[in-house]
């Protein structure tokens, strides 16, 4: 993109050159790593490495449970995921391993 192209930056509320916005958004990427150091991305499948008691759901997710299609939250240690019967499940990256 050239400097003639301007994009509205919602964070600052200003119009900025597209090249400047692309440079700042590349710096804001948070790397999320699992328990053994593998880099996680949106849509990955992960396996639990220990039994986890889910607060508010009244059930325990057992070690080895497969969680499909994770989403990164922007926090380096939290991932958002879906599991049958549990809405809004957020797991710590230290308790999962990439499959």
Image: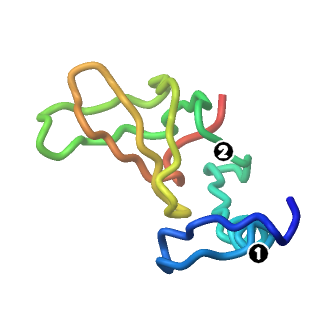
Secondary element type, mark 1: helix
Question: Residue drawn 65% across and 69% down?
Answer: 28
Q: State the residue lying farthest toward the right.
A: 2
Residue that label 1 marks: 20
Question: Residue drawn 52% across and 51% down?
Answer: 93
Q: Quadrant of residue 2?
A: bottom right
Task: Please state if 94 lies on the left or on the right of 38 as rendered.
Answer: left
Residue 70 drawn at (x, y percent): 51, 35
Q: Quadrant of residue 9?
A: bottom right
Task: Please state if 23 lies on the left or on the right of 53 as rendered.
Answer: right
From the viewer's side, name the closer residue of 28 and 51. 28
Q: State the residue lying farthest toward the top.
A: 84
Residue 16 drawn at (x, y percent): 66, 76
Q: Is residue 31 above or below residue 98?
A: below
Question: Residue drawn 31% across and 40% down?
Answer: 89
Please name which of the two marks, 2 or 1, marks the residue nearer to the observer. 1
Q: Is residue 43 above or below residue 72?
A: above
Secondary element type, mark 2: strand
Residue that label 2 marks: 40
| Mark 2–mark 1 distance (CA, rounded to whole Å) | 27 Å
Residue 19 drawn at (x, y percent): 81, 69
Q: Quadrant of the C terminus?
A: top right
From the viewer's side, name the closer residue of 30 and 5. 5
Image color mode:
rainbow
């Amino acid at each position: 993109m050239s400097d003639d192209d301007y994009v509205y930056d919602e964070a600052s509320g200003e119009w900025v050159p597209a090249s400047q916005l692309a440079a700042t958004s590349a710096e804001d990427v948070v790397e999320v790593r699992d328990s053994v150091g593998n880099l996680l991305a949106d849509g990955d499948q992960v396996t639990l490495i220990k039994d986890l008691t889910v607060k508010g759901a009244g059930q325990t997710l057992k070690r080895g449970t497969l969680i499909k299609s994770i989403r990164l939250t922007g926090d380096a240690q939290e991932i958002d995921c879906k599991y049958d019967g549990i809405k809004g499940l957020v797991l710590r990256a230290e308790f999962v391993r990439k499959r």
